[in-house]
Image (cartoon, helix red, strand yellow):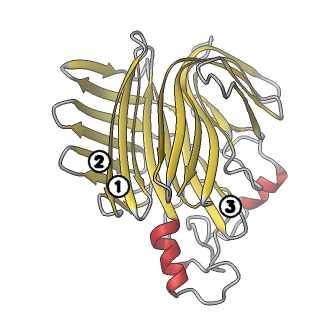
Amino acid sequence: MITNNITACQKRRFGMNPEEETRLIGLNGRPVFGIRKSTVLSFNLSDLRIYGKNKTDGILKRFITWFRIKRWQYLGVCNDKIIFGAAIVNLGYMTNMFCYIFDRKAGKIVQFDAITPSGKAGLFEGSFQNGSAIFKNGKASLSFINRPESVLAKISVKGKLDAELHFLKLTEPLCCTSRVGLDGFNYTHKEAGIPVTGNVTFRGSGYEIAENESSGVIDYTLGYLARHTFWNWASGGGFDEAGNRVGFNLVQGVNETGFTENAFWINGNMIKTDVIDFQYSDLNLLDKWRIVSNDGKINLSFYPEGERSADINTGLIASRFHQPFGRFEGILSDGGKTWKINNAAGFTEEHYAKW
């Protein structure tokens, strides 16, 4: 069961109509907002009613579902040797894939990106509970097979990188649907500090991903987001001083309207936290970061070791982000018990998008 570290407002959402519990869109044609007990099983966008409109069809609805809905799946692995990540992003009018590997000892990152017009190269089927996300072009292929208890990722960038990873899902994921402005919404499913096994091969060098040394991160998101969107994100995991498996997902800038996606996990048990404040230098994002929660449950310092960044602006769309990789240390608390971490691996992010 989910811990009692959840606000009364969030608890009330657990009493939602059973018919709506597994759907993104409720019986009234609008998104079902709140923290859910489990992941959405049906992204029933065909039932979406435009805010303030009685009808459920029309040109405006087709435009929103085809071009304004954003959907992505990200998978990451963190350990003492590497930080690895891969994602498939469908923006409706274009598809983006990326994967990267950061060698922590060398402090070097290698990344691969591909952008294709329209959303046809990035196909999402079903849900995160039982479905898939597939990207394929002439140079790269990514396959994320989502099952009730696990995710199997197969990644290949011709002649450069190959990976096969098996993520074991947590029994208590963070599943949140929040408002975006007057008429938008965002649904996200997050897990961190999860067991992961497999291997990554890069230019002939192999990295074995062992469960007792590595932590996984999962982000599955679908939303009708604002034209201009900004967020800070921190995620990662490892083990505390007592050997407990630890993971955390912390955000500011999105998913803060009524409900938040801020949480951490101890041995797979989720503990919800309040809003988060990211404190860092905008002049040097490789300086130390501090990440604290309003309720005092999160008090972390982050020490960057390198970063992935980009600044793309075509006029119509833009993406400007920095994603430092490195080490977390500090205290996690449920208001009574505390867990001290000294060497958790992961990343932070500053991201602005116009889409």
Q: Is residue 145 above or below residue 23?
A: above
Q: Nearer the viewer, mark 3 or mark 2?
A: 3
Query: Which label is found at residue 132?
Result: 1
Mark 3 → mark 2, Cα distance in angstroms:
30 Å
Quarter holding residue 81? top left
Helix, strand or loop at mark 1: strand
Residue at x-position 43% and y-position 14%: 107
Q: Check whether the beta carbons of the residues at disc 2 and disc 1 lie within 8 A of each other.
A: yes
Question: Which residue has dot 3 on it?
Answer: 180
- Name which of mark 3 and mark 2 comes first in the sequence: 2
Mark 2 → mark 1, Cα distance in angstroms:
7 Å
| Residue 128 spot, x, y in % from top left | 45, 54
Residue at x-position 57% and y-position 14%: 243
| Residue 17 spot, x, y in % from top left | 68, 71
Q: Amino acid at mark 1?
A: Ser
- Left or right: residue 51 versus residue 172 is right
- Name which of mark 3 and mark 1 comes first in the sequence: 1
